[in-house]
Image: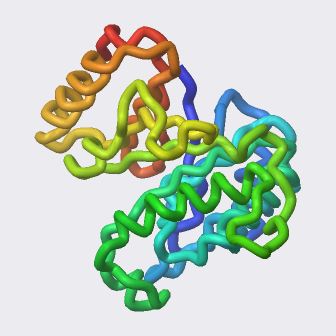
Amino acid sequence: MLIGIGLPATIPGVKGPDILEWDRRADSGPFSSLRIIDRLVYPNFEPLVTLAAAAGGTRRIRLMSTILVAPLRNTGHLAKQAASLDALSGGRLTLRPGIGRRKDAFQAAPARFKNRGRLFKQQLEWMRCIWSGQSPADGLGTAGLQPIRSGGSEVLIGGYSPTAIQRVDVGEKVKPLEAAEIQPAFASWTALPRNNGRRMATLDSRASSKPSTAPFARTLLIRPRLTFEITIVLRDRRRRI
């Protein structure tokens, strides 16, 4: 069991030095990762900038976005930002992109809310191409440095909704990303709501129908007064939690 701790970057009144001190304490403690959520229409710290600051003040702990709304961002810039953060942190970045569900964020970006799922798939392909050192388009050079991790930063994909769970191809690479270093087997849900049992059952069903030796990351987000996350990585997909 890996236990990560959320950054207090969305708590009103939290100052920059408070977050940096949080980074240092988490790095010296038992936590496996520092995690930050992504909101645009909200007085919070931007996640990639905050993780970059954490990279400079930590040495061990992984840096994770939970989640990063990819369709709000320019794909080429996002790929280069992630690769840069991965390199600056010594390969400690775990990127968890998602499509987002808040219309106000897309209005503020601005970005198209409609067809964001299709765009998200295209973004994964484009970033994989850039991270592998290939030219993203004919006649262009490479778009930035390659990450420390071969094939790109560690990427987990998933979400909260039934549609997102169905999007997770448990046990196989997301086509056409066969060469990408992307873990497709990820799902996240909030603790305590009544429909969590149904979500878990759906995920278990998909996992058991497609056995694999690849790790299956199931993330439980618990929201008491302080936010933290528990990630359980199962190599035996038949095991239940």
Relative image position of residue 98 (x, y in whole percent) = 44, 58
Relative image position of residue 90 (x, y in whole percent) = 86, 43
The residue under the point 87% across, 54% down is 88
- The front one of 222 and 132 is 132
The answer to which quarter of the image holds residue 211 is top left
**Colouring method of the image:** rainbow
The residue under the point 48% across, 66% down is 69
Relative image position of residue 226 (x, y in whole percent) = 47, 49
The residue under the point 31% across, 16% down is 241
Relative image position of residue 129 (x, y in whole percent) = 67, 55
Q: Is residue 196 above or below residue 41?
A: above
Q: Is residue 90 left or right of residue 217?
A: right
Residue 30 showing in the rendered view: yes
Q: Is residue 50 above or below residue 21?
A: below
Q: Is residue 176 above or below residue 99?
A: above
Residue 26 showing in the rendered view: no
Q: Is residue 240 left or right of residue 94?
A: left
Residue at the extreme front = 138
